[in-house]
Image (cartoon, rainbow, N blue to C red):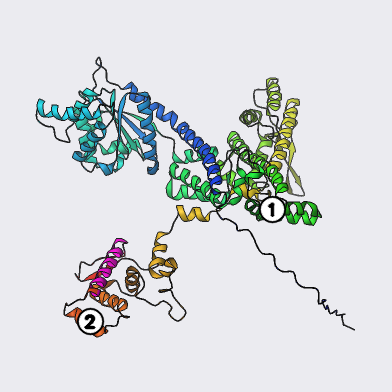
Amino acid sequence: MDTKKCYVYAPLEQESRPSKRQRTSKSDPHAGLSERLKIYSKTWAEQEKKVQSTLEEADRATQGKIVDFVAANAPSEDVPRISIPTGLIVAGPSIASHGPYFERLGRGIRDVTNSSYVVLTSGESPNLKTFLKTLINKITSRVEDDDDEEDEIGRSVNSSVRGPKLLNFDLGHVQEWTSRNPVQSIVVAIQDSEAFNTAVLIEMVDLFYSWLDRLPFVLLFGIATSAESFEDRLLGKSLRYLDGQQFDVTQSDDIIEKLFRATIAHPDTEPHIGPNLCRRILERQKDHVQNTQDFVHGLKYAYMSHFYANHATIFLKYDAKFKDFSPDAFEAIRNLPSFRRYIEEKLEAGDTQSVRQLLSSDKFLFEVIEKLIVTVQNALSSLSIAAIVLTRIRESLGITPKVRLSNVWSRAASGELLDSPLLRETMLSIKKTPSDRLARLIDSLISLATEDFGLDAEQLQRELKTLVQDNAGSGPLRSQDDIRNESVRTTVVAQKVLLSKHKAALSEQDKAYSEIVARFYQRLESYFSSALVDPKTLLLYEILVYNLKSPHTEVFQPRPRLAIERALATPHDYLGCECCGNTPDRENTLAGTQPATAIVYQLYLESGAVINATDLWFAFHAIVSKDDEEDQSQTMYVMQMSTISNDTDHTRALFQRALAELKFLGLIKPSRKKADHVAKMMWKGL
């Protein structure tokens, strides 16, 4: 019989369901915020030092040459100047990075030489007269001593006593200023020379050349394209006045890679940026910004978001003790996904005692957290070192295509690098590399040799050096996996040609070299297997890794048009009021309680390409005043008779302000065809 037994459970009357435990303590969402702010300030201060040192190191070579150029062209009484010393600074296509670069260059010139340094842009110099006014103002505003105010008063008196008053664009002001403030050179840096009017540049060069016997000018031109294109813009006579020298600045992409190495991929970085956010920052940097300062700002915002939004980051506090943390901090740890997964694994393994202690004892959990944070940090540091090792191997062996460290690190941090084609290709190249390249590779890895590196590079270097010195041949040693040690044999069987590969006979030295290569390969393979771990598998990795890209994208890649259209079409979404909210029976209806600009915009959406302003006013007035007690027909009659009441004056003012705001947003413009019409410039969603 296909039947099953059924049991009926009848609870006893004395048994009752236990009452639900109520929360007696109130949790503070901002608990420990001040402590996290202190941790963030200290952490970012260390990162900022790395950023500044990296930028200075990247600019040091070129800026040192420019400073030496300025110092070497100081005027001399024995050798009169016959041309203007000119530096052509090819700063690359990243226009946004030119400003910070010239600012750092100015600090270097002022520190080393006694020169006056000013930077001018095309926006400040639409014509020669405005250019000279701005130049004179910037040069003479340099503070040399505490008697600046007295000097200015004395200059104004002397100017009127000694002779006629100079015009405000006369370089005689600069000559008078240099007589009181002796300087070696007056360095004029044109930041965006290609945006300047060509006529202004030519007139400027001619004027500076005419004053060269009285004013020691040095010109620096910032160039985004090439020096040849800049020279083509000037006349031959103007070029003869210039004594030029070209300086190539480190490009923005290379500086970004150096910043990435010093901040994100550095082994001592704490906390780390996750792979998703890292890719987002690099893609934005490549496609939109190309500015080192914006890269730093994006990194700083990621650090701010991590410490502000994650309560568990308070455990990154230095020299922390158990009494420094509130119960809410431990509850935040217990709600982390990695901690929950760890508890489930403990339960499956039957370790219920540890689970009970982790869930009930904050003291026990604190001791575990102290050890785990060190473990996770060491694992992330090993991951960064492994990415650097792989990148350096490919650079030393010259493997193509070239892969940047940022790409390697992002793939390693996402757990995609182990057993990837990129790693297999690199390891296969090591097997086939000759002795000269292997020696360079080991030399480059010695600086990375640490306790957790797992590779005795110095010992391998000594063995390889001894083996190479004993090599009697002129060529480098080759391993047994090198294709040059293979030969192809052809065999004809039954009118078919068969090809087979055979290993050539190896010398004793090649065999010894093959053993070194095999040992090196095995150590690297073992190292990569242990170092390239998926950070998501680490317990409490959320404390040390920030990988949320949504707030970062909204701030650095916002969509303002979508937000403006939504605010004007549905103002209730932002205002949160009940008076103008959409209800099921009043869906997409206009209400007089909505903002005036929102009402006009919704009428604007229903109009054509050209809108009659009078019709728009009548429709707006009808919506705003439809709830009034005054009759609509009487209102229209009053408007036509120009006997407008105070309420109508207020409504008209709201309407005019709404039109002005729509014009400011670029949605409408006055129509040239009809004076009482406005032209529609944008359609929603297009």
Please indicate, yes or no, whether residue 26 appears anywhere in the rendered image. Answer: yes
Report the side of 275 relative to 102 (left or right): right
Q: Secondary structure at mark 1?
A: helix
Q: Position of residue 621 (x, y in %)?
A: 28, 76
Query: What percent of the width, then of the height, locates residue 556?
Result: 45, 52
Give whichever of discs 1 and 2 has the lower sequence position. Answer: 1
Which amino acid, by three-letter code, is at mark 1? Phe
Q: Residue at x 23, y 30 (%)?
A: 149
Which image quarter holds the C terminus? bottom left
Where residue 563 sits in the image (x, y, percent)?
42, 63
Is the magenta region chiefly helix, strand or loop? helix
Magenta segment boundaries in residue numbering: 647-666
**Is 491 located above or below residue 139 in the figure?**
below
Give the labeled residue for mark 1. 339
Which numbered marker is on residue 636? 2
Label 2 environment density (alpha carbons within 10 Å; few <14, some 14–19, many ≥20): some
